[in-house]
Amino acid sequence: MKHKIRSYVIQYGKRNWFAFSSLTFIMSVTLMTLSFAASPDEDLLKKAKQIFGPPLPEVISSGTNPLTPEKINLGKILFYETRISIDGTVNCARCHPFSLYGADGLRKAIGHDAQANPRNAPTVLNAAGQISEHLIGNRQDVEDQAKQSVLGPATFGMPSYDAVDKKLREIEGYPPLFQKAFPGDKDPITPDNATSQ
């Protein structure tokens, strides 16, 4: 009898060991499969890349206007500059605040002297990657859009590019910033340079 009990315990133990080992193996394989399988987010990203193509580049630069740290610095300052509007209240950030993803969210953007523009302000985020600029597509690139906006009758309202240049030259800090951003130019404060950051 002792022999039967001992044999039964050994057999029962072996069966449990086999069951435990089998279960452990199946669980290990399942966990490995799950860890190597794509997550729902990865599947969604893969589908999006198939539909929309690769993600946008980190920097969208122009072959005709290479970016430099000095141009970027000057551009950031000019983006918030109100003194180049006819009434001293309008800057790029007024209609394109980054806190609202580069668009003010208004039905019609508000320009100088509280005038309503004929259209809303589209986002400026990733605008350099667009085929053309402005809501009607009549601007060649972001530089052209920025340049023409200062003369826009309902936006900045400046009478001429000469008036913009004159104001920028009169502001003490701008001549050295333009000189650093455009070191090869004898007179770097120009309409093209003022809008090419």
Image: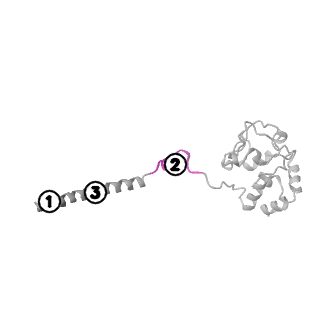
Q: Tag 1: residue type?
A: Ile
Q: Kindly indicate whether the residue at mark 1 contacts the one at mark 2 (C-beta within 8 angstroms).
A: no
Using the rendered view, name the quadrant where residue 10 is placed.
bottom left
Nearer mark to the viewer, of 2 and 1: 1
Q: Is residue 164 left or right of residue 137?
A: right
Nearer mark to the viewer, of 2 and 3: 3
Element type at mark 2? helix
- Other residues around mark 3 within 10 Å, as few (<14) / some (14–19) / many (≥20): few
Q: Tag 3: residue type?
A: Phe
User: CA gap, disc 2 to disc 3?
Assistant: 39 Å
Horizontal and vertical percent position of residue 181 = 78, 61
Q: Tag 2: residue type?
A: Leu
Q: Earlier in the sequence, mark 2 or mark 1?
A: 1
What numbered label is drawn on residue 20? 3
Horizontal and vertical percent position of residue 30 = 36, 53
Query: Residue 54, relative to residue 105: is it above or below?
Result: below
Is the C terminus in the top left, top right, bottom left or bottom right quadrant? Answer: bottom right
- The residue at the point 76 percent across, 39 percent down is 109
Residue identifier under label 1: 5
Q: Kindly indicate whether the residue at mark 1 contacts the one at mark 3 (C-beta within 8 angstroms).
A: no
Which region of the structure is painted magenta? 38-55
- The residue at the point 72 percent across, 56 percent down is 65
Is the N terminus in the top left, top right, bottom left or bottom right quadrant? Answer: bottom left
User: CA gap, disc 2 to disc 1?
Assistant: 61 Å
Element type at mark 3? helix
The chief SS type of the magenta part is helix
What numbered label is drawn on residue 45? 2
User: CA gap, disc 3 to disc 1?
Assistant: 22 Å
* Residue extending furthest toward the left: 1
